[in-house]
Amino acid sequence: MQVDTKDIVATIAYLMGVRKSAWEKQYAENCPTLLQELDEKKESRIIRSLCKIRTTLMQKFKHTDQQLRFEMKNLDTLPEWYDVGDIRQLMRWEIPVILVNKRAQDYMTHINDLIAKHIDNCKSLFPEWMKWEYIRDLFVIPKYTNPTIMKHEFAKYMEKIQMYPYQVYMHWKPQDLGNIFYSDGKFLGVLYDMHGDYFDDRSKFRDAAEETKNDIYDFINRSYRTVLVVDCENSDVYKLYSVLKNLNSDEISKIGKIILYDDHHTTNGWDYLEKVISIPVEHIEVDRVTENKSLVDIKVATGVCQEFYRNDVSSFILLSSDSDYWGLISSLPEAEFLVMYEYAKCGHAIQEKFAEHEILNCSIDDFCTGNIEDLKRIVLINELRSYLPDILKYNGKELAVQLFELARIEASESEITNFYNRYIKTLRLKIDNDGNFSIEVNY
């Protein structure tokens, strides 16, 4: 069983200015640390404050204009409508939000201008696989300096305000779709459809159910000592990272170490896993006696036995879809095993064995892959750097495709294009004090 994630839509809701009480009710359980993280980022605070002002200006446009025109008031002296704390903080950050002797229409143009200038600073809050231009379009009104355009936006918003999530203003064609800020899956579907596009990678917004995660926590907590053993030949490093990334960090920190049994034919991604996790990693490269015969499986089996008998490890999380490991599991009845596998690689017969002998198991395919960009980026950038001395021999777009293939990362054309635009098109020629040239990745 899987559930939709809410990290993306919770970030959108925060930036749009959804009230914190409503935000916490909807997202706090799924994203327990996100609110504090966004509150601590200057770029997200700026956009949230500006969007709150714009929404209030839309809702109180005539009243605001009257106060500005006849009562000598300004936004920071209308605390019953505008968040004065937000305005003062913007001013401390030298965001010139307050105008002098201006009307509400001038303010609308000014706030839209500030949002357009600062929204790109929030790009890093979203995963690289998302199309930033689609997100940006929710915040920036095209041709907002045109009074006719803004009158249309104002009329549309006020007429159909109930169709705007939490009644906060955003730039879209309102439809009666329920709360499109409910989950990442629903939001991504609507967002891409707005642009005549389709988002179909469910792994980006579907995560393992809490029941599955709790089973893993219980397994770790009832164990004297637990290690995670990985058959790198029969496992996907990015899916393993998705498991670790989407589990509670306090719970998985109880895993003593991760032992990687690797072969030189696997992806280089295994070399970088320890850079993005806090669990100690022991990386064992298994040499071959003959090139056509891997010894990883026998090394895993003997390694598990050594950990059990020599190091008092009582429990093993075994990551592999190879049914041959049933021989290992059945030979160590005193040890506890939790087996993680991939659906496409794990046969029905071994799953029946798990059920028959009550061996806890789960699929790493169930965990969300939408938040593992940091590992992918490290692997891709290091692959790119290996090409830098001879970069002029390659076509940049073809090289981008080749890098993903070498890293064994399944990606859409959009993801590959985003990487090309962000890291290959921005390669820079650098010269040091001695006059030596080098090519630098903007990373």
Image (cartoon, rainbow, N blue to C red):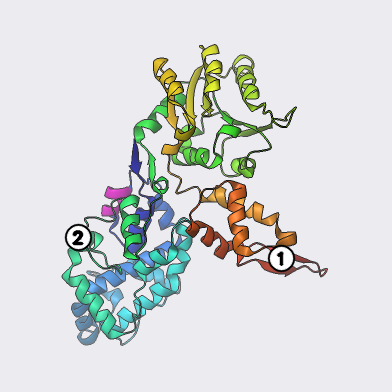
Specify start and end residues of the magenta stretch as a single range.
21-27
- Please give the residue where the numbered disc 1 appears in the rendered image: 392
The location of residue 147, given as percent across then percent down, is 28, 85
User: Picture quarter containing residue 151?
Assistant: bottom left
The location of residue 268, given as percent across then percent down, is 64, 43
How many other residues sit within 10 Å of disc 1, few (<14), some (14-19) or many (≥20)? few
- Nearer the N terminus, badge 1 or badge 2? 2
- Give how far apart the Cα atoms at labels 1 and 2 are: 52 Å
User: Picture quarter containing residue 19?
Assistant: bottom left
- Seen from this angle, which residue lies furthest left? 159
Q: Amino acid at mark 1?
A: Leu
- Please give the residue where the numbered disc 2 appears in the rendered image: 176
Q: Amino acid at mark 2?
A: Asp
The location of residue 25, given as percent across then percent down, is 27, 48
Q: Which mark is residue 416?
A: none
The location of residue 282, given as percent across then percent down, is 64, 32
Of 364 and 227, the residue lying toward us: 364
- Taking the spot 46% from the left edge, 63% from the top edge, the residue there is 123
- Taking the spot 50% from the left edge, 47% from the top edge, the residue there is 372
Of 359 and 309, the residue lying toward us: 359
Secondary structure of the residue carrying numbered label 1? helix
Dominant secondary structure, magenta? helix
- Taking the spot 45% from the left edge, 58% from the top edge, the residue there is 125
- Depicted 435 relative to depicted 204: above or below: below
How many other residues sit within 10 Å of disc 2, few (<14), some (14-19) or many (≥20)? few
